[in-house]
Amino acid sequence: MNFHDVKLLIENGEGFTLEFKRRISSPEKIARTIISFANTKGGTILFGVDDDGRIIGVESEKSEIELIEIAGKDYTVPPIEPQIEIVPFDGRDVIVCYIIESKTKPHYFIGHQDRFEGESTRVYIRVNDKTMMASKEVVKILKNENPDAPPLKVTIGDNERRLFRFLELYERITVREFGRLVNISDRRASRILVQLVRAGVVRIHTHEKEEYFTLAYNVEY
């Protein structure tokens, strides 16, 4: 990547696969962004670039690269190894950090408190131009995106048929709404919806305020 490539990325602005970072305040913070890209479709982080696209440059590329590597190695489970380049830009250096989409999803964030308690329960994904914590439904789906996951078999019963009829009429439904619709627990409703997402029959839509499900296509039932 060269000067012109970086400039073009900046002109396109932050988005689903691109984030600007003025500097690294802590490896824990950058680990969340790295995890979100690896758990979604991959992406690029430009260090030394302000939110408005101004080139600030990094003070010490050596120490910043070390913090990036620590973030990927010590704060993610399993570890993530970003690809890193240094691009000179008008006398200042921009660090370009590539994160490819992982084949071993989900990656978990583990901070100092998690390390002390022996837990690793937080998963992050990319939603539009933001890093968001994943719901338990999304985590289940990520686990089954692994190419080594067992083949899926889905049985269409009364609950699924009522779900399809509801979605044909109202287009979207949440886990809680589905549970109430067919009088089952939220846990069972979640399990059914996740299976249908894995089968490609239903789509999950993750937003900042609400997560909901829609039909992927017209279903015969």
Image: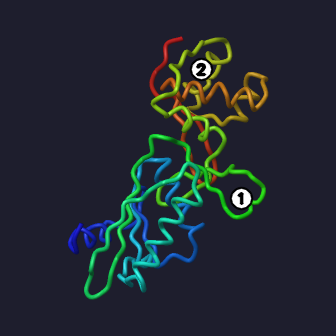
Where residue 169 is drawn, which disc sits there?
Answer: none
- Quadrant where the image shows the C terminus: top right
Q: Quadrant of residue 32?
A: bottom right
Residue bearing mark 1: 115
- The amino acid type, in three-letter code, at marker 2 is Arg
Q: Residues within 10 Å of mark 1 (few under 14, many from 20)?
A: few
Q: Secondary structure at mark 2?
A: helix
- In terms of sequence position, does the residue under pointer 1 or pointer 2 come before the other? 1
Residue 140: image x %, image y %? 61, 35
Q: Residue at x 72, y 57 (%)?
A: 114
Residue 188: image x %, image y %? 73, 26
Q: Residue at x 28, y 71 (%)?
A: 6
Q: Secondary structure at mark 1?
A: helix
- The amino acid type, in three-letter code, at marker 1 is Arg
Q: Residue at x 63, y 22 (%)?
A: 163
Residue situated in front as seen by the camera: 81 or 152:
81
Residue bearing mark 2: 165
On screen, 44 above or below 41?
Answer: below
On screen, 168 above or below 37?
Answer: above
Q: Is residue 183 left or right of residue 216?
A: right
Q: Is residue 177 left or right of residue 83?
A: right
On screen, 73 above or below 134?
Answer: below
Q: CA distance from mark 1 to mark 2?
A: 46 Å
